[in-house]
Amino acid sequence: MTGASRWNLQYISQDAVPIFEQLEDAHHARTLTKVGRELLRHLRHEHVMTRRELVNELYEVGEPVALMGARACVVTKKEHRVLDAAPGSSWERYKAAGIRVWDRSTGDWLF
């Protein structure tokens, strides 16, 4: 995934929301190139189910089922480091790390 689609995700962490909103404002103001690069330095495209978990799932249950778990979430750089060390898998890592997640499609917090 590249460009804007990499960041236009359904899930965003609570700490990433204000940065993401600034990014959207910059995009609408057509200053995305200049301002956007600076804002993107603070965000990370994080795989909810780690790549290792996804590969294992592919081998165990097959592609169509495994890919249903292939979600991504926009998080801050700091949160990304915390998630790398968090126990559990998938959304359990976020809960263990104390990271709240906003679902843009429903307008509700997942947890």
Image: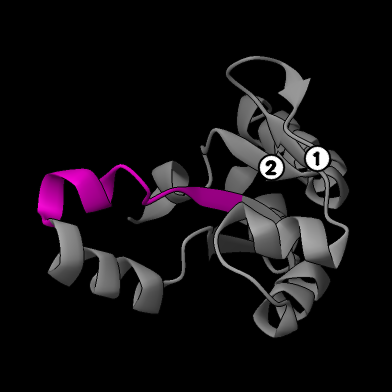
Q: Which residues are magenta?
A: 62-73
Relative to 39, is 104 above or below? above
Residue 59, given in percent of the width and then of the height, sits at 14, 71
Is there CB contact under 8 Å for labels 1 and 2? yes
Residue named by callout 1: 17
**Residue sitting at 12 percent across and 54 percent down?**
63
Q: Is residue 35 visible?
A: yes
| Residue sticking out furthest to the front | 60
Question: Helix, strand or loop at disc 1?
Answer: helix
**Corner quadrant of residue 45:** bottom right
Residue 70, given in percent of the width and then of the height, sits at 36, 51
Q: Amino acid at mark 1?
A: Val
**Corner quadrant of residue 90:** bottom right
Quarter containing the C terminus? top right
For mark 2, does the 10 Å Cα neighbourhood hold few (<14), some (14 to 19), or many (20 or more) residues?
A: many
Q: Is residue 91 left or right of residue 39?
A: left
Q: Amino acid at mark 2?
A: Ile
Distance, label 1 to label 2, CA atoms, is 6 Å
Which circle's residue, 1 or 2, is located before the other in the chain? 2
Residue 29, given in percent of the width and then of the height, sits at 68, 28
**Corner quadrant of residue 101:** top right
Q: Is residue 109 left or right of residue 71?
A: right
Question: Helix, strand or loop at disc 2?
Answer: strand
Residue named by callout 2: 12
- Of tags 1 and 2, the one toward the viewer is 2
Confirm whether the magenta stretch covers residue 72: yes
Relative to 66, is 93 above or below? below
